[in-house]
Image (cartoon, rainbow, N blue to C red):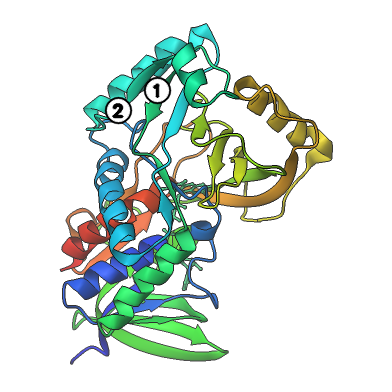
Amino acid sequence: MTADVDSIVIGAGVVGLAIGRALAMHGHEVLVLEQHGLIGSETSSRNSEVIHAGLYYPTGSLRARLCVAGKQMLYRFCEDNGVTHKRCGKLLVATKREEIGKLEDIGATAKRNGVLDLVPLTQAEAKKLEPEAQCEAAYLSPSTGVIDSHGYMVALEGHITSRGGQVVLNTRVDGVTRRPDGLFEVTTTSDGQSGVITANRVVNAAGHGATRIGRMLGFKDGYTVPATYPAKGHYYSYAGKSPFQRLIYPMPQGAWLGLHLTLDVAGKAKFGPDIEWKDEISYHFEHNDGEREATFYREVRRYWPGLPDGGLQADYTGVRPKIYRENEPVADFAIHGPELHGMAHFAGLYGIESPGLTSSLAIGEMVAGMVA
Ligand SMILES: Cc1cc2nc3c(=O)[nH]c(=O)nc-3n(C[C@H](O)[C@H](O)[C@H](O)COP(=O)(O)OP(=O)(O)OC[C@H]3O[C@@H](n4cnc5c(N)ncnc54)[C@H](O)[C@@H]3O)c2cc1C
């Protein structure tokens, strides 16, 4: 039997689109199926839009390797395709003397990860670059930047369609099975109508929905599809003109990067995300009787003492698809191909939180190779 289509990617977030693009570039006929009416309307449109340099992640991890490789691919892609971005750089700041050791440890990890452009700064040198920032010492990361993530996703979609592929919206995947003849059968609902599409290859890039989809397939004994745990983050934006030219990041706390200041491509400043472990996904902004705002003022003023009262405005939220629970060891990206789960031509992606946007093109290449 021949399949209806060569490859199906489930989920048109930035990662699904980058995988769809990579498959299309390798000559596969691709359908990207998305349940919503717009591409990238879950995690991919609720993030910080930072092109990360790859400073923090454990050396040798997928997060470190795919971030460093993906960053370079992403800058090149933006330049070649006219995607708005800014290589604005960031300051990683130690706001207390006790944090300087941690700052130096991050510098050492970055070097091991292949990030060789970090510039150590004294308090006076940092002040010269960003007069409003308060710190004892800092690193300048020149290869950190920001991107118009929606423009990037539109460009990825363009690459898919110009190679004969399609991104099909308003189409929810309800079932995936592997038939005895080796084809995948994907059951969908689209405008209330159900349908079945067969494919030679399937990639599960469904973000928060990936665990549910992964569990529909029968894998070899001993392989378990990772569970996903939502961890919500809130953002505040700055009401006035930002006095900063670069992003400002305080010291991370465990795997959480702290309440940092980022800029969008137009230069507007925002702060966050904080972190709260949840039982379910909701994008509702929770004010907590003013407690959240007070925490943001306190934490941001550690590196920006001049933040004026009334400067913060509640903005939006995003939810990280974590594959570990609070207080458990931090997990790497889980990008599972046939070698791990034993099913040829299938790949599942779980826990693709930050730096998934930065890593997306490198993830695309990796996954296209896995299901080839
Ligand atoms: C608060 C926050 C800040 C972040 N900041 C950064 C950053 O600054 N830099 C960076 O590099 N990364 C960042 N990230 C990470 C980055 O946003 C994610 O790694 C990336 O967006 C994940 O993309 P995705 O395509 O895997 O998932 P998603 O964007 O969630 O896409 C999955 C898609 O699958 C669809 N789907 C799900 N189930 C089904 C189904 N059954 N049928 C059809 N479609 C389905 C969904 O509708 C969705 O559109 C951040 C993440 C968060 C949460």
Relative vertical location of residue 73 with respect to residue 42 in this rendering, above or below: above
Q: Residue at x 44, y 11 (%)?
A: 100
Counting from the top left corner in percent of width and height, residue 267 is at 56, 47
Q: Nearer the viewer, mark 1 or mark 2?
A: 1
Q: Amino acid at mark 2?
A: Ala
Q: On the picture, is 340 further left or further right than 193?
A: left
Helix, strand, or loop for circle 1? strand
User: In the visual, does 350 lie left or right of 297?
Assistant: left
Q: Which quadrant of the view contains residue 161?
A: bottom left
Residue 359 in the image: x percent, y percent?
A: 33, 50
Q: Are marks 1 and 2 in contact (CB under 8 Å)?
A: yes
**Residue 263 screen position, x and y as percent:** 54, 44
Dot label at residue 110: 2
Can you tell which quarter of the image residue 197 is in? bottom left
Q: Residue at x 48, y 64 (%)?
A: 150
Reply above or below: 236 against 24.
Answer: above
Q: Residue furthest top?
A: 97
Residue under circle 1?
A: 139
**Kind of residue sitting beneath label 1:** Tyr
Dot 2: few (<14), some (14–19), or many (≥20) neighbours within 10 Å?
A: many
Determine whether 17 is above or below 85 in the image: below
The residue lying at 24 percent from left, 46 percent from top is 69
What is the quadrant of the C terminus in the image?
A: bottom left
Residue 53 vs residue 80, the one in the foreground: 80
Nearer to me, 216 or 87: 87
| Disc 1: CA contacts within 10 A as few (<14), some (14-19) or many (>=20) | many
